[in-house]
């Protein structure tokens, strides 16, 4: 028997050389042939030819385990072996005999490599021995490592116990650290709050120090302001004290003082104290200067040396007087607060709360009393009574002093002083020689000379408007009266002044009317759907107050106000009623009725209100008619639908043919009458309840019910006439019987 290649040592060395460096050991090597063709079948020559290959069994040690591999090596061009494929033995397929091999001694290994019969047998035996040796080695290694494994398992158990203990300790430490972190966060938050409080307290101390500095009155300045002397050596100290007082008052006012401090009790008290100090100082200084300069002038007049010397006249020396004026000039500027307008305000007292009209939250207690605010009109009338004659006299004197070509009119200083607007006949004419150009120059000069005096009048008008806007009506009449009395040519500036005052009053009153209209429109957006709207009774109260203030020609101003406000009221009322069409007629009739009831007395004496009263009456009747017709139709719906069909058919056919139409026979009539008129007392009670439902003004119910009964009887009477005409002989309850039934209910 030929020698097998499995025992070829050279082949084994060549295999070891080819796999050098792979840490694999050659156990067995054997030559085989590789072929992809199958004998007995046609194929290409290249595919059927066998290729020389070497199969080697190798092992690799990994720790205590040994693994076996099957390597396939091929011959290179130089005749050396080189590895091509590597298989694990557990993946090796079984060895099968090739059935188509005619020799019967060829086997297929891994479906690819072919070896001889003898080589396959040797290969199989060697494989068995090697596998047995590997298994024995593995079992022996396992037996030897049993003690080590037990030690390792014991060590693992000890390690697990230590890990569990460490985990428990770490959990305890984590809980403690968590509490420590929370404590640290609380401490940090507390420290931050303390720092914030410290900073706030520091800022507060600075603000309070600043405020206390403003509130503190130096004793020496207080003494100077209250009881100090006004002699020349102390003039600078008085001026310094006055400037400090002005600055202190300014620092306690809102533009400079923070608004949050303005309502502090200490600030209010200190402000009052400073105002009293200011009033005292102004009064003392005014009295001193008035007496001082009066005595100085009297002394100069009485001392004849100022005017003559040794019987000859000389020019008076006013150097001392000019020096005194320069000395006290700055103090005089600080006394400018003592003005006529301020004195007038100080002597006039009005209510604290201004009037609020047409606002939903405004109550009757918020309206200013006409007696309390009457002093406003009196003050304005007093100003005109005092100033207008003086201004006219000043204008006349200036015209003649400056030689303007205007006539000298007698008693011109009395024009307008009586307050009745009456002037003498000789004041109404203009001299024939008067020149328009001269008058224009005169008026321009007077405008430049007297410009600025109107500011006091404006201040009083605005102040009066602030507390009682309705006082504009009486002041407008007073202005008209004085304006109509100024017929003097030289009083052009006075007429312009009165025109400006009248414009100012009209503008202020227009603002009041616009505010009223805005509040009415605002009430419309927030109005309830049922009931009397709030601005209806408030307008009646407003109209009553306005009528009390009418003087002279202010009637037109009041009538224009009535027209604007009532027109907007009616428009807003219609829009409010349309918000809920289901109740629109109820809203209209209740509000129009309230308007008529509240203005009944005034409408009898005021033509403008009488016009709106008639308009409200017509709208009330229309709303009542619509509402009552709807209730009657809903209550007796089938009866009046039948009547409507009869009226419609009578237009196209004769009455005798109607009963032969579909749904209009006598049987249909009897059925309809039975369903509509049976239990009539209950039906009428239901109609009364429907009329009463959603009606907030109970005083309107009797009149509405009477109108409802009247309209129902009229409609029912018309229905009975139609039935008697179309269905003669049918038994229908007459209208008189229905009238008696309604009268009993």
Image (cartoon, rainbow, N blue to C red):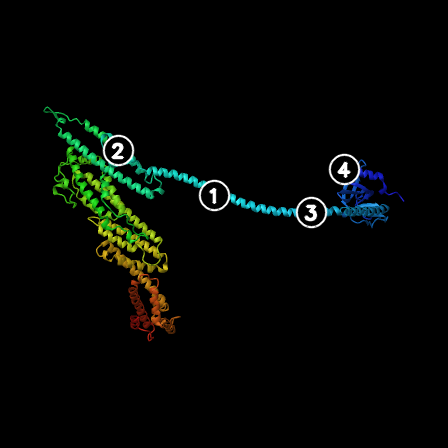
- What is the spatial separation of the Cα atoms under label 3 and label 2, in whole angstroms? 103 Å
Secondary structure beneath dot 3 equals helix
Position of 341 compared to 315: left or right? right
Secondary structure beneath dot 1 equals helix
Secondary structure beneath dot 4 equals loop
Outermost residue, left side: 311
Report the quarter where the N terminus lies: top right
Tell me the tag on residue 156.
3
Q: What is the crowding at mark 4: few (fewer than 14 residues within 10 Å), some, or many (at least 20)?
A: few
- What is the spatial separation of the Cα atoms under label 4 and label 2, in whole angstroms? 117 Å
Residue on which the image places disc 2: 238
Q: Earlier in the sequence, mark 4 or mark 2?
A: 4
- Whether the residues at callouts 3 and 2 have beta carbons within 8 Å, the answer is no
Residue on which the image places disc 1: 190
Can you see residue 38? no
In the rendered view, tell whether residue 510 sits above or below residue 577: above
């Amino acid at each position: 028997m030929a020698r097998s290649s499995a025992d070829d040592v050279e082949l084994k060395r060549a295999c070891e050389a080819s796999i050098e460096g792979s840490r694999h050991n050659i156990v067995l090597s054997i030559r085989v042939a590789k072929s992809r063709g199958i004998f007995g079948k046609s194929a290409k020559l290249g595919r059927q030819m066998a290729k020389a290959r070497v199969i080697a069994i190798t092992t690799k040690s990994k720790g205590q385990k040994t693994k076996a591999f099957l390597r396939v090596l091929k011959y290179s061009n130089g005749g050396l072996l080189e590895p091509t494929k590597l298989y694990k033995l557990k993946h090796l397929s079984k060895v099968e005999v090739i059935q188509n091999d005619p020799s019967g001694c060829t086997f297929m290994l891994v479906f690819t490599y072919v070896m001889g019969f003898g080589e396959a047998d040797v290969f199989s035996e060697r494989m068995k021995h090697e596998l047995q040796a590997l298994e024995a080695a593995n079992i022996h290694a396992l037996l030897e490592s049993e003690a080590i494994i037990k030690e390792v398992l014991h060590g693992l158990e000890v390690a697990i116990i230590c890990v569990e203990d460490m985990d428990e300790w770490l959990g305890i430490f984590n809980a403690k650290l968590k509490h420590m972190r929370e404590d640290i966060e609380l401490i940090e938050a507390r420290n931050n709050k303390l720092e914030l409080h410290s900073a706030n307290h520091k800022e507060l101390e600075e603000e309070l120090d600043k405020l206390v500095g403003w509130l503190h009155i130096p004793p020496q300045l207080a003494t100077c302001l209250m009881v100090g002397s006004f002699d020349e050596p102390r003039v600078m100290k008085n001026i310094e004290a006055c400037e400090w007082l002005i600055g202190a008052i300014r620092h306690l006012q809102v533009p400079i003082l923070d608004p949050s401090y303005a309502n502090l009790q200490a600030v209010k008290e200190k402000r009052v104290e400073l105002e009293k100090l200011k009033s005292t100082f102004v009064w003392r200084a005014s009295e001193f200067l008035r007496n001082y300069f009066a005595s100085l002038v009297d002394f100069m007049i009485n001392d004849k040396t100022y005017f003559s010397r040794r019987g000859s006249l000389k020019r008076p020396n006013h150097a001392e007087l000019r020096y005194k004026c320069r000395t006290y000039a700055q103090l005089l500027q600080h006394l400018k607060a003592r003005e006529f307008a301020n004195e007038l305000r100080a002597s006039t007292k009005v209510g604290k709360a201004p009037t609020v009209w047409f606002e939903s939250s405004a109550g009757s207690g918020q309206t200013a009393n006409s007696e309390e605010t009457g002093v406003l009109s009196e003050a304005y009338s007093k100003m005109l009574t005092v100033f207008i004659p003086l201004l006219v006299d000043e204008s006349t004197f200036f015209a003649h002093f400056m030689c303007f070509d205007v006539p000298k009119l007698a008693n011109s200083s009395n024009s307008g002083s009586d307050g009745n607007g009456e002037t003498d006949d000789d004041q109404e004419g203009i001299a024939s020689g008067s020149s328009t150009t001269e008058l224009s120059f005169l008026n321009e000069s007077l405008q430049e000379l007297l410009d600025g005096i109107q500011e006091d009048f404006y201040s009083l008008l605005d102040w009066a408007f602030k507390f009682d806007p309705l006082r504009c009506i009486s002041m407008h009449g007073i202005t008209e009266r004085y304006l109509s009395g100024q017929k003097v040519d030289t009083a052009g500036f006075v007429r312009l002044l009165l025109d400006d005052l009248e414009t100012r009053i009209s503008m202020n009153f227009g603002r009041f009317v616009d505010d009223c209209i805005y509040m009415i429109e605002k009430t419309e957006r927030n109005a309830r759907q049922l009931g009397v709207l709030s601005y209806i009774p408030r307008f009646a109260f407003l109209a009553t107050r306005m009528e009390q203030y009418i003087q002279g020609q202010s009637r037109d101003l009041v009538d224009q106000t009535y027209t604007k406000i009532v027109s907007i009221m009616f428009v807003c009322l219609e829009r409010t009623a349309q918000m809920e069409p289901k109740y629109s007629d109820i809203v209209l009739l209740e509000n129009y009725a309230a308007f008529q009831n509240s203005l009944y007395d005034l409408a009898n004496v005021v033509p403008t209100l009488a016009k709106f009263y008639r308009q409200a009456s017509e709208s009330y009747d229309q709303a009542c008619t619509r509402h009552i017709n709807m209730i009657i139709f809903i209550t007796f719906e089938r009866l009046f639908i039948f009547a409507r069909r009869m009226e419609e058919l009578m237009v196209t056919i004769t009455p005798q043919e109607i009963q032969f139409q579909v749904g209009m026979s006598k049987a249909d009539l009897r059925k309809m009458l039975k369903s509509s008129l049976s239990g009539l007392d209950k039906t009428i009670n239901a109609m009364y309840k429907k009329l009463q439902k959603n009606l907030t003004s109970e005083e309107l119910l009797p009149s509405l019910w009477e109108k409802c009964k009247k309209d129902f009887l009229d409609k029912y009477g018309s229905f009975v006439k139609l039935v008697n005409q179309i269905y003669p002989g049918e038994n229908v309850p007459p209208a008189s019987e229905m009238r008696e039934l309604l009268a009993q209910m």
